[in-house]
Amino acid sequence: MQNIYKKAINHTVLYGASGILRKIVGFLMLPIYTRYLTPEHYGVAELIMMVVVLVEVFLAMRMGQAIFRFYCLAEDDNEKRSVMSTAFFVTIVTSTIACICLALNADHATAFFLGDTKYADLLQLGAILLITQALEEYGFIYIRVHQRALLFFILSVIKLCISVSLNIYFIVFLDLSVNGIIYSACIASGTMAVFATGYCLYYSGFRFSMQQLKQLFLFSYPLWLAAGGAFYSESSVKYFLRVFSSLEDVGIFALAAQFASLLFVLVWSPFVTTWQGMRYEIYEMPNAKEVYRKIFLAVALLLSVAGLGLSLFSDTVIRLMADEAFWDAGKVVPIMTLAIILRYIAQFNNFGFLLKKKTGMLAKAAYLNAVIITIGFVVFIPVIGLYGAAVALIFGSLAQLTWIEIRSKSLYYMELPWFRFFVMTISWVACYCLSYLLPEQLLIGIIGRLAIVLLFLILVFVLPILSKEEKQQILVYAKKAYNKISKKLGMKQLKVS
């Protein structure tokens, strides 16, 4: 069991480091984006990328989840290579078809989603991403199933450097505005696609198995339906804001989403990159449910701490880094953060559906979420605008989480500690509400917000959230981390029992 934990921590650090570095650079770019792009242009870029993802979800036949399952459970290396190669070639064919379809219908797509056809040429160029991102994604999946976290990190940094350099060149020096964002995305993704293709072909070769394709397809198609619902839940808000409000609000909401997405970068992405394969390994362990509960609490605590921090400091950071036209984004981040945490917890709890190949259940959960948020968008956005959109996302995520918990009991019940999660969530939300009592003075406000984070950590130990053993484990890990730092600084070390 210790090896499982150690491997998870080591890989999570590397996977997380690439995401954190990417987000740090993205934040350093914010003053440039928000001064060289208007909220409307920012909204246009978001809507173009939304259309590309929409086509990808329904036509590109991505099989990432299926690869993890059938690759990890394959009986020999030949079967593993067959799984990877079959999925790779099928997805390339379907992605190419999807690219052609989108390019030929760019006028109709921009008229419907953006309300104007003047960006049709830009969407045609963006359609190339359907091919390059498919190649890129499968290369990174193969690297992850090979558990080469360091290579994953290096490639992520290379792509980041290419993307940032091109964005600065196109947006700042050539003043290409929204065009520069699409140009840099295509070039950076295309560069990585070349390497990813070589990596996949080198390790899997040219193999195709109709039997593997059938298994991959039967496992994946309900997930595509679920992905459609998930895409709708995450992206339809941009369309409804454009219809019921304006392109400017789309851009402001997109900036708020960038801040809220730090939860994905700091916690969820590094965790889930390891979790997708590891949860099947844990399932074979005699004390699997105990391990699942411990990991669940650890992830929930990390999400809560990060969520509280984002909620407390986003508004200040946005006011310091972004143009005044974007400042309303900071007020929406806390609401979006709660919705995102609920969504990630629901994803953690869907393992029973994947294990028992009941992926159709995930599609139903996704479309339940879609129905709830649609009602919320129609009701709340015309009344309270950006805030209404974020509130609707909370209702949708909560409905999805509840449905998954109820239905998963009949498949593989993980027996997760929901009461402790509920107390944890109420605690950090209550702590955030205390920030409204703080003065507007910058330095005092920052100190007060740090004190609120400390208060929440104290509540975690005082309230019925962690067991005595879990508290002791956290203290041991904290002391070890402190001792590593203090040793390098020549400071006195703490005794670890």
Image (tube, rainbow, N blue to C red):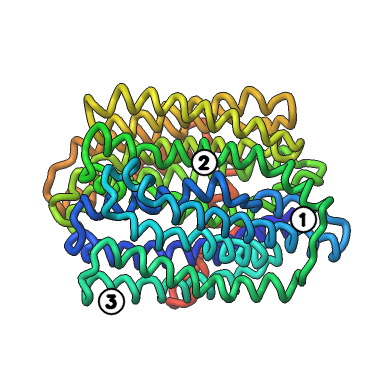
Q: Nearer the viewer, residue 485 or 313?
A: 313
Q: Position of residue 287 (x, y in %)?
A: 77, 41
Q: Residue furthest right?
A: 75
Q: Amino acid at mark 1?
A: Cys
Q: Label 3, label 1: how many angstroms apart (C-alpha)?
A: 42 Å
> Which residue is the site of mark 2?
344
Q: Secondary structure at mark 3?
A: helix
Q: Nearer the viewer, residue 324 or 316?
A: 324
Q: Position of residue 99 (x, y in %)?
A: 51, 57
> Which residue is the site of mark 3?
169
Give the mark, 2 or 1, whose residue is nearer the N terminus. Answer: 1
Q: Secondary structure at mark 2?
A: helix
Q: Position of residue 4 (x, y in %)?
A: 71, 56
Label 3 Cα crowd, 10 Å radius (few <14 / some 14-19 / many 20+):
some
Q: Label 2, label 3: how many angstroms apart (C-alpha)?
A: 36 Å
- Report the mark closest to the observer, 3 or 1: 3
> Which residue is the site of mark 1?
72
Give the mark, 3 or 1, whose residue is nearer the N terminus. Answer: 1
Give the mark, 2 or 3, whose residue is nearer the N terminus. Answer: 3
Q: Left or right of 171: which side holds 74?
A: right
Label 1 Cα crowd, 10 Å radius (few <14 / some 14-19 / many 20+):
some
Tell me the quadrant of the picture where the C terminus can be found.
Answer: bottom right
